[in-house]
Amino acid sequence: MKLLIKNARLVDGSGELGNADVLVEDGRIASLAGGDAERVLDAGGRWLAPALTDPHVHLRTPGQETKEDLATGLAAAARGGYGTVVAMPNTQPVVQEPEQVRALLDEARSIPGARLMVAAALTENQEGKKLTPAALLARAGAALLTDDGRTNEDAGVLARGLVYAAAAGLAVAVHAEDAGLRGGGVMNDGPLAAELGLAGNPPEAEAARIARDLEVLRYAARKAAALGHAPRLYVQHVSTARGAALVAAARAEGLPVVGEVTPHHLTLTEEAWRGFDARFKVAPPLRTAGDVEALIGALERGELSAIGTDHAPHTAAEKERDLENAPFGIPALELAFPLLYTELVERRGLPLPLLIERMTTGPRTALGLAPARLAEGAPADLMLFDPAEKRTVDPERFVSKARYSPWTGRELVGWPRLTLVAGREAWRDAGLA
Amino acid sequence: MGALAHLLDFAGWDRARVESLLETARMMEEVLERPMKKVPALKGFTVATVFFEPSTRTKISFELAARRMSADVVGFSGAGSSLAKGESFKDTLLTLQAMALDAYVIRAPVAGMAHQAARWLKGAVVNAGDGRRAHPTQALLDAYTLLEELESLEGKKIAIVGDVAHSRVARSNAELLPLLGAEVWAAGPVGLLPERLPGARLTTDLDEALSGADAVMVLRLQRERMDEGALPSLREYVAEYQVTRQRLDRAKPGAPLLHPGPMNRDVELEGALADGPRSRVERQVRAGEAVRMAVLYHLLVGRAA
């Protein structure tokens, strides 16, 4: 069936592209100059952008479906304007066999939300000791290898993992925190943690580990280069000024590293802890206003080139435990775009194409996927959003099972109204005719 | 200031509120001196002591305080381990709330639990110690004891010695005593001092802290600090930071000695000092009862009025 999206304002990571009537046919953009269609949708001058790609979500399947499942997670993603998400493997059991990857991809095909991509563990049970079969996992469709949720303590294992992943064509993502320095920290270490009497996780724990991992990458790159392979390191959720600076310096030097930043680290600070509320408990922790400024700068300059939500749903009851026992994680799939549109584009004047780029082509390049562009022949992975209509964040309306939010009550604009995945309607706001 | 809804810490407190509460405590202590140690002030109110962390002394002190004012008292004790296993402390609190209670005296192992409880409960919450965060009634009883000794805390130097980083007593005293004009010093080894302690000056130099002090408060040293690596050597601690008679000579003559208890004799302080003429440890316990009566009275009667 052909679909015509009339009167849309086009934007992608390359810039604002003017108004157009977009014809979608056979899962692709057939034309930007209109055409006949069975179905016509009036965008009313709203923005039409490539659907977003989230390289970092926890869909808790298999094993922890009380927190989230594929249906709710992929529906939440589609509502948030995401066409593609990469699910982390720290499930129960851990995703580390090719059969598990295939099974998840199969199951997701019948679910009408965003497209699922699956990350598999880099090491068995994510213990950081014995590598998983990178080539078999890649052949089964794994998009990325990572022990996310755990930290890779053995640098030698990580180096070999980067080489094997490179040979299989995959990037390796790391949760870069030094376990010893992090200790039992629940919030950012510093004067505020001391004042509140809570155990701190220092910014240096992240910087120390990123610095180490960059040296590991340098070593792995040297080893693999002789055989024609290029390891790629993806540093998840960079949260500190120092961590961002390390990634920037390595990139300037030509090391194949990509740094990710999350919506929460771009918009929240440790000050939220004054309310003693585990909704703000996340690893790495929320940092200082100075870190937020540095992260936004690094995002603008492309030193951090990918935005990933690290959507980490837990049950409301788990998040109401005490601050030591409550689990780490913030759910953000349904809010990430309006939140960042409001905070960065509306409030701070960040160019819209730049935000789109960091939420589409930035992560896609890191994953080895094609850039997201609005062009004839490109996949019809599209997202329509409304820059004007204000809505208040109300977690009761989430389709994610995690119905709480650090941003409850915030008034945001930029809410997605329509998400297409290969031309299929993955989400349409009831208000959109 | 408005009526006191909860006692979680001293955020938002001013001197007038502290003085008014301590004045009530003095009236309450008169009750404790009577042959019939009971008044009907809280008749009809029910107070729950909810202890997610064991503490016999604080629990007894609060329960007696409530009973002296004719409140009904119920007690709940849950081990910290049940929380670690995922049992919800919120559910525990909501169950208690369904029993029509008026005040909840909460002791908890983690900072912030009293604040969380206050968000969920309709009744008044009294923080009886939450992790490292706060122990406001301890600080109030310390202030009460100090005022009795020194008459005024204006310009007085109060030295707090020991494991300051992990101490809710130190945090609450550093918040409270400056409201009464005191100058608070906190001394300890580098691994047991926090990065910041609002209201206090921090030093690793014990002699500097004790020098000219008007009163000295010694904190309990928990042996688990050694296991955590925060303190490398107990022997070194004792050699460098134990409050001894000799070191106490740097303080003002007769400066009172306080300890929140329970005490490790010959660890954080020279054992004999605890029984010596400067020790106000028993006075603190008695003051604790009066102060807790005052707190419950202000919260329950102040709120009802």
Image (cartoon, helix red, strand yellow):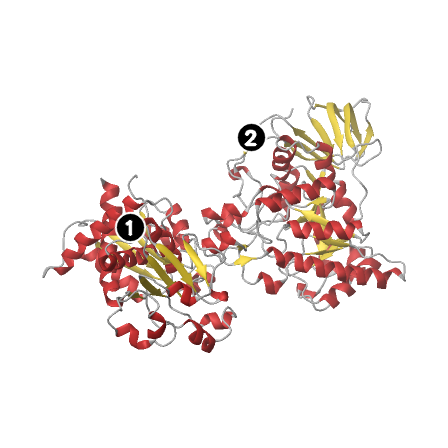
**Identity of the residue drawn at 49% across and 75% down:** B233
Q: Position of residue A33 (x, y in %)?
A: 82, 23
Disc ID at residue B262? none
- Work out whether residue A375 or residue B40 is closer to the camera in this orientation and state it: B40
Neighbor class of circle 1 (other Cα within 10 Å; few <14, some 14-19, many 20+) is: many
Q: Position of residue A54 (x, y in %)?
A: 69, 44
Q: CA distance from mark 1 to mark 2?
A: 39 Å
Q: Pick the quarter of the image with the C terminus of chain B.
A: top left
**Identity of the residue drawn at 72% across and 29% down:** A48
Neighbor class of circle 2 (other Cα within 10 Å; few <14, some 14-19, many 20+) is: some
Choose top left, top right, bottom left or bottom right for residue B1. Answer: top left
**Identity of the residue drawn at 35% across and 68% down:** B250
Does A265 appear above or below A327? above
Do the numbered discs 1 and 2 sit on residues whose CB atoms are within 8 Å? no
- Helix, strand or loop at label 2? It is strand
Disc ID at residue B103? 1
Residue type at mark 1 is: Ala
**Identity of the residue drawn at 72% across and 68% down:** A130
Choose top left, top right, bottom left or bottom right for residue A389. Answer: top right
- Work out whether residue A385 or residue B2 is closer to the camera in this orientation and state it: B2
Q: Position of residue A127 (x, y in %)?
A: 66, 66
- Helix, strand or loop at label 1? It is strand
Is any atom of residue A304 visible in this view?
yes
- Work out whether residue B203 or residue B252 is closer to the camera in this orientation and state it: B252
Q: Chain of mark 2?
A: A
Q: Name the residue beneath numbered marker 2.
A: A391
Is any atom of residue A91 visible in this view?
no
Residue type at mark 2 is: Arg
Q: Position of residue B302 (x, y in %)?
A: 24, 43
